[in-house]
Amino acid sequence: MTPSTSTFVLGDEGMYLFNDLPRQLLQERYGFQPSDKWADELRLSSVRFNSGGSGSFVSSSGLVLTNHHVASDTLQKLSSEDRNLIRDGFLARSTEDELKAPDLELNVLIEIIDVTDRINAAVTEKNNPDVSAKQRQGVIASIESESLDATGLRSDVVTLFGGARYHLYRYKKYTDVRLVWAPETAAAFFGGDADNFEYPRYNLDATLMRVYEDGKPAVIKHFLRWSEIPVSDGDLVFVSGHPGRTQRIFTVEALEYLRDKRLPFVLDYLRRKEILFQQYQLEGNEAARRGRDELFGIQNARKAYTGMLAGLQDPQTIATRRGRQHRLMTAASNDPQLKPLVSAWKEIADIQQEKAEQLTRSVSLRSDLFQLAISILLLAKEDQKPNGDRLAEYTDASRDSLLTRLTSPAPLYNDLQRVKLADEIALLLERRGMDDELVQEVLAGRSPREVAAEIVDQSKLADPEVRRQLIDGGINAVLGSDDPAMRLARIIEPEYRRYRAIEDQLSEREKQAYAKIARVITAIEGTGGYPDATFTLRLAFGTVKGYVENATEIQPTTDFAGAYEHAAAHAGQDDFDLPESWMNAKSKVDLSTQLNFVSTADIIGGNSGSPVVNREGKLVGLIFDGNIQSLTSDYLYTDQQARAVSVAGVGIREALRSIYDAESLASELGQ
Amino acid sequence: MTPSTSTFVLGDEGMYLFNDLPRQLLQERYGFQPSDKWADELRLSSVRFNSGGSGSFVSSSGLVLTNHHVASDTLQKLSSEDRNLIRDGFLARSTEDELKAPDLELNVLIEIIDVTDRINAAVTEKNNPDVSAKQRQGVIASIESESLDATGLRSDVVTLFGGARYHLYRYKKYTDVRLVWAPETAAAFFGGDADNFEYPRYNLDATLMRVYEDGKPAVIKHFLRWSEIPVSDGDLVFVSGHPGRTQRIFTVEALEYLRDKRLPFVLDYLRRKEILFQQYQLEGNEAARRGRDELFGIQNARKAYTGMLAGLQDPQTIATRRGRQHRLMTAASNDPQLKPLVSAWKEIADIQQEKAEQLTRSVSLRSDLFQLAISILLLAKEDQKPNGDRLAEYTDASRDSLLTRLTSPAPLYNDLQRVKLADEIALLLERRGMDDELVQEVLAGRSPREVAAEIVDQSKLADPEVRRQLIDGGINAVLGSDDPAMRLARIIEPEYRRYRAIEDQLSEREKQAYAKIARVITAIEGTGGYPDATFTLRLAFGTVKGYVENATEIQPTTDFAGAYEHAAAHAGQDDFDLPESWMNAKSKVDLSTQLNFVSTADIIGGNSGSPVVNREGKLVGLIFDGNIQSLTSDYLYTDQQARAVSVAGVGIREALRSIYDAESLASELGQ
């Protein structure tokens, strides 16, 4: 990939690889030349939350800054009936008070190595996707395993440009991660579901954690300095984070599949779960606490997908893409070298049909207990195979991260587990019908609620020690276990594998087809500049910039004064009360301090918690959201109105000082 | 139908026709003989809310008692930003203060005439369902129209036993109905969605209205006396009301269609609307007010259907029915006279397949504006045809009720209308795909939101005067109108008619098949005693009786003391705060007064607001709910745990006196 501008990218579009930064583009447009040191410092200060999110080192003693909503999974797991960290927030007055997260894994990207040639050389079979997938999987497992053995670093092979490039990413891992400070949800998620994806915003969606090594705060060499200066309209800013997934290479037919099948299907599922959790939470205050974080995740996804679907339902969206696709296909058809690649579009279209047929066939019940059980079962079974033949999550290189998850001491509540499992079994029944053999075997004459109650009440798998013993016991212990959750996993496993094989085959065929399309795009439009997001480290850039909405000019920055005004304007509405700490501190806070700002940087889910830095590489903000107009950016970047939303660095420091009485923490930032 | 007991009914099962009361059964089981006077008084005191619900006359001056949740549609329509009757309740201190409902129609059943023979004689075609449906529709329209002309009474032909019997119902109509008293929602719907369909309950789900004639309170000869005595465990009680729909004749295949197709489909739809309304209501306090009643209706339906589906998903439910069906079919196959009828089961099974294919094809957008527009369009077009050839809602006999609805002055809010219409258009797109011709014509290159915004913002149909002028203008005005809502109706009309014709044909075939099945049942099991519910007046009976749940004995009655305790036990939870009026009056209320009670009477949706009377025909309660165990009663009555839930008559009077300071109203009850 040559680092050059492209006719393909629009405005400040782009999520660039750190080994392929848009140097020429930045120079031409902004007169900015990132030095190697600037880029290395930023990369080594950037942190991936393996649970799905981004963060950054912000002190030499291991402080990690991320979003409250990235940390909330940990806050939920550290809470109990008597200690509601989600609602009340948390502040450790000393390192002794810091709370160890039950199952966090943080990754820092140390090195990227291009392994495309080795992988392509190993994949000799071109026409049988089952064989080529096996070959590719085998060589990837070997590369990862060799790298792990050689370096001790977490080693992941990443598929880029839909399969045109493969890079090996090596990460330093931190698994002793402790909670230092979190604000109340009322401040972090001020405005609730109503304000989510809206702007202007006034949210302190920030949390501080600390990584430990050998039981002591880790000594961190590369961390971000904290800018004392708020951002201003027009400032160039950079986002270094881990965008989860984009689909910008998608063909028209792939987008139509999203629009007509996948997104309506996913939204029906999300709304079902949203109502289910709402109903569960009505059972009382403790139920409301137990279900809080999961409901938030569901609502967030529902609102995001609703915006994505609405964008696709605008006929203009796909019409634009259709034009470009037509031009590419025509140009490729007229070029003898590219002509053999044109069939890839048809292949993608065919795959969408097959995906639609698979949509309701998944048997991977979204129940924590079932997921633990089937993972333990598959782990034991995959362990019987050579490393290269295993399902991707069960290779040697993936083992540590998997074990962290499978033996997490995070609590599982029986009442909630019953509700979740019963609904998933009912859904299995709805999708496959009562006469389906698998359904018959799962129900055995009982109702979904009865089955779920029996499994949850009698299974011992909620105890992490029991899970560890099963894992250590290996294949005999796992196959011999009469735990009802393990029994359910054994019943479902054959169909799970059958479905998984179809999924993997479709994915392999799609990979091969998109690799061809990527070659056409590169040949005709020049390099696209950046591959679709893969939950690996990327650099985005943009400017701080307002926008016009319904003939109103939206200013790019907000301040603390605005937060208090917003609360007053929405008095009596749910989720618009600022917490007591804010109300009590109002006279102490410098109300003109910047609190949130927007920029044109190209972000997506997974970027949550990403540091925003200025030309000097100093932290000026913390990505926490996109506005409603940005919800189409999964498949289409625009900078007309779409904006990334950040908490201002100066706002975080001001809140720590004036609201949370955490002067020493505020002083530690950037030091 | 001979009035006798049947092996078919269980316990206190049954929703009996007033011209076919279960006299022998009541005599045998309870030693009770309803006199003709007792039955006539009860029938003539019973009121149907044409909007969907029941009620009763409770004073000689036209007072009508119903549920708050039946009245809430009217409360919503009478409310505005400055007057929130749903939240705050209402009390008219004098008749001058009583508020006229914008579009209520109340019906009192005056007479029932069996017209089966005339209809069967007119339906000469047996093999072509299109022709037989037309013939049946024609003769029904004639009967209704003749009856209306002859008596001036609303005249409806009712299809009973799935088409085995037809009765003509004649009603006196009241259309000047005024609001007298309603409690706050916090008292009427105390415990909210959490407590809905639960028991024990403590709800004052009651409202009083008054019917007027010639601008004065109507003089009512037949009304219910008010019992001074609370009910006791074991008391025999009667429910006189209008159960909306049951499906107890359904075959196994029809229940499987409900379980595997229809109910999951409907629940996806309801959850979609529930989230849509929740999201709309987040926009602010006024949006919350505007969407309140519709959201309640959606949530209520969602909870009811969830319970229905869960019941069907218990394999035992259908296994029981399968056994009975097998016995019936075997017995009929062995009887030369009945043998030709056995094919009806296969016919029903076939129809379910066809129904499944139609499930996503409906184009009747659930938008108020669209419904008004298409109704006005169809009215003008159907008016061009002879009475007997029209769609059922547009016959001469139905005209008055239709006009009441179409010219209602109830407010339509543009913001809410935009949200509703945009979602319905998006759903049309999701179901039919972007390439569908109708979708293309509706969108014309725009997004669903853009189309909805244009229609709602530019249509004048929200104004009832504009609607009246269009209706009065007839076919030319309607076809010439360039109102965008009328344009949308004209675009959709052909497909609406195509779909409607298929629906009507399926319904006709089903009717013929169930009529055969009803004949088999009668021949083999004796008369079933009662036909499935048809939103016409029925008598149910039962005893006041507690039940056991999770090894706990649930007492059949609750009192005001319990209400205050329930509020205290759920402090901090949404919808568990009693209103200020209750908190202020606590010392004045006789806390031992009965508030709610349960009985084994057989009820279903539509029974809401039904009076509960004792052996003397005096009012002792007001049906407002069934418990969660009763949610299967649509297709399966049981009295194991399933119960009907009522507000106690003595509780209503006590609340009026001690909480609402409405002594004169309390004294008027039963007088």
Image (cartoon, coloured by chain):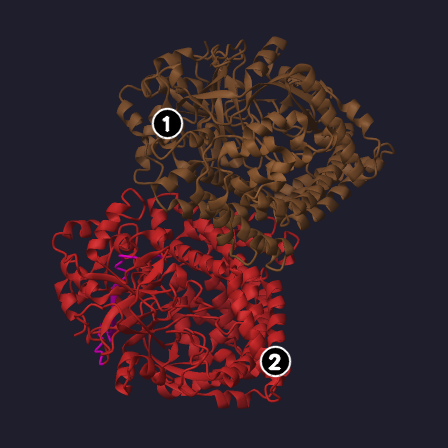
Chain colours: A brown, B red
Q: Residue furthest right?
A: A336
Chain at numbered mark 2 = B
Q: Nearer the viewer, residue B410 or B629?
A: B629
Of circles 1 and 2, the one toward us is 2
**What residue is at 47 percent from the left and 61 percent from the top?**
B308
Q: Position of residue A216 (x, y in %)?
A: 47, 12
Look at the magenta stretch and give its main secondary structure: loop
Q: Nearer the viewer, residue B237 or A484?
A: A484
Q: Within the image, what quadrant is residue B127 found in?
A: bottom right
Q: Position of residue B335 (x, y in %)?
A: 60, 87
Residue B208 highlighted magenta (yes or no): yes
Q: Position of residue B470 (x, y in %)?
A: 45, 67
Q: Is residue B130 visible?
A: no
Do tags 1 and 2 sit on the same chain?
no
Disc assigned to residue B342: 2
What's the magenta region?
Answer: B198-221
The residue that mark 1 highlights is: A89
Q: Within the image, what quadrant is residue B360 found in?
A: bottom right
Quarter of the image that includes the N terminus of chain A: top right
Amino acid type shown at disc 1: Gly
SS state under label 1: loop
Residue B591 highlighted magenta (yes or no): no
Quarter of the image that includes the C terminus of chain A: top left
SS state under label 2: loop
